[in-house]
Image (spheres, grey):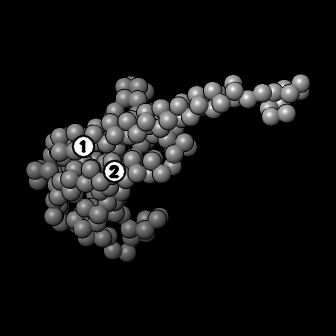
Amino acid sequence: MQVGIQVHGLKPVLETLRYVDRDLYNATTKEIRKVSQPLVQKVKGDFPSSVLSGFMKPAQNSRRRGGAFPHYEVKKARQGVGVKIGGRKNQLTNSWPVLRVQQKNAGAMIFDMAGAANRGNVFVKNLEKEGYGKASRVMWKSVRANMPLVEKNIRDAVAQVEKAIGTKLDKSIERRAAQSEFTKTQSRNALGQFGG
């Protein structure tokens, strides 16, 4: 599960940057990850230390294909929170995600999103009865509530990369113009070759 921040126009710039200047691309994504850490820490802290007692113990002697049904462990739930840079285009908003906060732990995902599609089962009713609320119980609410902590820093990082790209383009244009001027001063032989 992922929620995140979107900035219009940045994704194509980052994609271009990945091929044009890999060092600047890596520095940019590293900076975005760095400035997102206060948000990540808040989201991690919002996962409760305990949930329904039966959901916190691994199923014993499970014959389920793929192993026992995932259970909730707060340490793993908090370790499962991380960030992803970029992602697929949102067709509704016509924008690309810059940063996504995601949960990779299966038990935490089940706790967070149980009942998003079907609210009729006993597990979902028990979560709601114990006061954990409806899906999304942590991720969406926490990211939305804490986004102001990092939004300005992410936009500043975006502005820095845009400025750096503009500077590189200006230098490239100046270099090409200088090469063009130099070429005009060179004589060509009868075959159109320089310096003959």
Q: Amino acid at mark 1?
A: Asn
Q: Quick one: quadrant of the C terminus? A: top right
Q: CA distance from mark 1 to mark 2?
A: 9 Å
Residues under numbered marks 1 and 2 in contact, where contact means CB atoms less than 8 Å apart: no
**70 lies left or right of 135:** right
Q: Earlier in the sequence, mark 1 or mark 2?
A: 2
How would you rate the neighbour count of disc 1 (Cα within 10 Å): few for under 14, some for 14-19, many for 20 or more? some
Between residue 195 and residue 107, name the one nearer to us: 195
- Which residue is outermost to the bottom? 61
**What x and y, as percent, mark residue 186?**
73, 29
The furthest residue to the right: 190
Residue 138 position, x and y percent, is 20, 49
- Residue shown at 24% from the left, 68% from the top: 75
Task: From the viewer's perspective, tell me whether residue 33 is left or right of residue 21.
Answer: left
SS class of the residue under badge 1? helix
> Percent from the top left, x then y, of residue 13?
46, 35
Can residue 81 be seen?
A: yes
Q: Position of residue 69 (x, y in %)?
A: 36, 63
The residue that label 1 is drawn on is: 153
- In which image quadrant can residue 50 be found? bottom left
Residue identifier under label 2: 31
**Mark 2 Cα shell of 10 Å, populated few (<14), some (14-19), many (≥20):** some
The amino acid marked with disc number 2 is: Glu
* Secondary structure state at the residue bearing disc 2: helix
The relative height of residue 66 versus residue 46 in the rendered view (above or below) is: below
Residue 119 visible, this orientation: no
Q: Say which quarter of the image contains residue 159.
A: top left
Which residue occupies 89% across, 24% down? 190
Taking 138 as reference, is 89 above or below it?
above
At 55% from the left edge and 43% from the top edge, which residue is drawn?
19
Q: Which residue: 50% across, 35% down? A: 171
In-image side of 22 versus 93 (left or right): right
